Amino acid sequence: MAEKIKVGIIGCGGIANGKHLPALQKESRVEIIAFCDIIEERAQQAKEQFGTPDAKVYTDYRQMLQNPAIQTVHVLTPNRMHAPCTIDALHAGKHVLCEKPMAKTASDARKMVQAAQETGNILTIGYQNRFRKDARYLKALTDRGDLGEIYFAKAHAVRRRAVPTWGVFTNEYEQGGGSLIDIGTHALDLTLWMMDNYRPKAVMGTAFKKLGKIPHNGNAWGDWDIEQFSVEDSAFGYITMQNGAAIFLESSWALNTMDADEAKTTLCGTKAGADMRDGLRINTCDMDTLTTIRPALDGEGVAFFDASKQPEPADLECACFYDAVIDGKPLIVKPEQALVVTEILEAIYQSSQTGKAVYFE
């Protein structure tokens, strides 16, 4: 057997334990030999559950990066640290999978792309929703041209009441924002990817801080700390592209609406449309009749088939990264694409602050 890829983890909190470490545990080509967290106990706990017996524990990621045995690094920190950890890891000769969003600011994201280009090391961003079965199917349709020219789209990331109450999600300094940068980023990434359009022209946006200071609001994870809630609870953006296409982005952690949907997209093309609002639906006109197509993505009617046993998107994301590292296969999420997502999110925040549109060159 080929020698296993040696992995280092920076950040051992919720996203590490809930997504990346379980996925790595299923990946037979790797072993985790280093864990870093500013809270040593978290790194130690992660090591005991997911690491090799002799795995090292660190509280300073720079010290961890000095370990020459480490070949890949997963950056799983709050958003503020995505860029410094990633850039330092790339310059230390490591390949990097960084959790979404790419960075807190567009400037930091551009520096990450530059570091990957300068070092020649692999960088990808954790937009795992691209690996969902419905997303992969719809992407194949759009690439084949079934929808024609996609000239209008909606990116959906709306929760009625689901503010994350753990970690630093509601801390603007650490995260850079709230619902928009947390879940709006997934919906926008899916939409741009389906459209294969990464050339924004102008952005107009509004972010609201309306419900974050109101206690006892029926939140899915219990009451949030109103004293620590320094980010928006909802945000909306209208994006025009260089080719004339338009995108409406809606995001919320808390909004008085019954129309909730998350990490989904609606696409309108010249030949057909598609949405994910009630399963994947393709709408078109066939023989002068409006027609809706619902792909059987869950294997309906197939004996002895359990759709729940299919690989999780996080597992496929992890496998794609190591396919690129080991075999040189193409990435599904390219850093240049993730950069555009961050640039648009930042423009929505900027537009909300100034009340003016933000224009791209």
Image: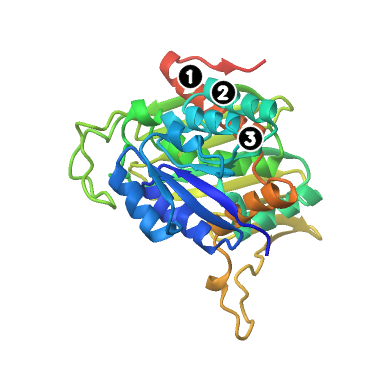
The residue carrying mark 3 is 335
Asked if 120 appears above or below 285 in the picture, the reply is above
Mark-to-mark CA distance, 2 and 3: 21 Å
Nearer mark to the viewer, of 2 and 3: 3
Nearer mark to the viewer, of 3 and 1: 3
Give residue 245's quadrant in the image: top right
Residue 248: percent from the left, percent from the top? 55, 35
Q: Disc 3 or 1, which lies upstream in sequence?
A: 3
Residue appearing at x 27%, y 35% in the figure: 211
292 and 222: which is toward the camera: 222
| In this picture, residue 255 sits left or right of residue 70 | left
Mark-to-mark CA distance, 3 and 1: 24 Å
Instruction: Find residue 187 and name its label.
Output: none
Q: Disc 1 or 2, which lies upstream in sequence?
A: 2
Amino acid on which disc 1 is placed: Ser
Residue appearing at x 35%, y 37% in the figure: 59
The residue carrying mark 2 is 203
Secondary structure of the residue carrying tag 3 is helix
Q: Disc 2 or 3, which lies upstream in sequence?
A: 2
| In this picture, residue 223 sits left or right of residue 43 | left
87 and 308: which is toward the camera: 87
Residue 358 seen in the current view: yes
Q: Crowdedness of circle 1 by 10 Å Cα count: few (<14), some, many (20+)?
A: many
The residue carrying mark 1 is 351
Residue 212: percent from the left, percent from the top? 27, 35
